[in-house]
Amino acid sequence: MCSFVNRLKPVLAYSLCFQKGYSRKVPAHIKHIGPGLRTSKQPLDSVIIRPYCSRMEFGKGLFFRQLFESESSTYTYLLADKESREAVLIDPVLETVERDLKLVEELGFNLKVAVNTHCHADHITGTGLLKNRLFGMKSAISRHSGASADILLSEGDKIHFGKHHLSVRETPGHTDGCVTLVTEDHSMAFTGDALLIRGCGRTDFQQGCSRKLYESVHQKIFTLPPQCLVFPAHDYKGQTASTVGEEKRFNPRLTKSMEEFVDIMVNLNLPKPAKIDIAVPANLVCGLHEV
């Protein structure tokens, strides 16, 4: 038993570093977890370990929390400056507004802006109800979305919260009004429906254009650092995050040529979103629909 514990000591020590949110190479001397067990066929000293956690709290005073709404498989993201307590909420959903409000209150944050990455077709945004419940909170969306909001975003705009900000990159293609929001240090990109994990948003409705989406992803997202974390608006397979580097290598659609990509998108034959006839009209008015 003692010899087994001794063999585990270096792995346990590295595990503590992993839990603290570090991203680094596995020390070269950690070759085996136990007799006959390896974590990969690849030499471990060349493997990058990177934690994808729904409650990571990054350095430099940035708070981050990933939240999930199960009916539409939508991710909502809460970011805050730990010192000023100012916060931003990305892609809130009407059905989970109470959860989000409770979390913001418990953590003592001042929610300044609720921003939508685009005019969603599969759920009603929670921004309208949030505005009714939080005095002074502003809504935000792309000025090309056709939707109303307090802040209409364009390329290069910044959403400030405390000493942090999110930069706006216009990434149309899924819709005309899609934006990707990038942290100031380029460590995180909130890609909406433009880039999903090993996929992308559909292009067969709401001004969708496959060529435009391909160009958006390659020019505005794939130009970010390879280690930049990708946080999409949806995932349907239980995945929580990816990286720019991973998607550039492994995305089965966006690693193709543009012509191949267009052909893939034309032949998806996806069903119409169940809530599109309710969600789109509501989201064009900031979600103030029977609220």
Image (cartoon, grey):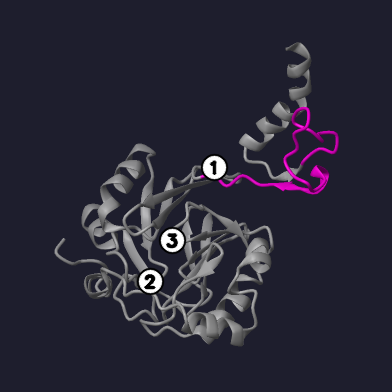
Alpha carbon distance from label 3 to label 1? 21 Å
* Quadrant showing the C terminus: bottom left
Q: Which residues are magenta?
A: 26-53
Dot 3 or dot 1, earlier in sequence: 1
Q: Nearer the viewer, mark 2 or mark 3?
A: 3
Farthest residue in the right direction?
29
* Tag 2 secondary structure: strand
* Residues at discs 3 and 1 in contact (Cβ within 8 Å): no
Location of mark 2 (residue): 141
Q: Residues within 10 Å of mark 3 (few under 14, many from 20)?
A: many
Point 47% across, 84% down: residue: 266
Amino acid on which disc 1 is placed? Glu
* Tag 1 secondary structure: loop
Location of mark 1 (residue): 57
Location of mark 3 (residue): 234
Dot 2 or dot 1, earlier in sequence: 1
Secondary structure that dominates the magenta span: loop
Q: Is residue 152 or residue 266 the one in the foreground?
A: 266
* Residues at discs 2 and 1 in contact (Cβ within 8 Å): no
The magenta stretch spans residue 50 = yes
Residue 76 against residue 15 in the figure, above or below: below
* Quadrant showing the N terminus: top right
Alpha carbon distance from label 2 to label 3? 18 Å
Amino acid on which disc 3 is placed? His
Amino acid on which disc 2 is placed? Ile
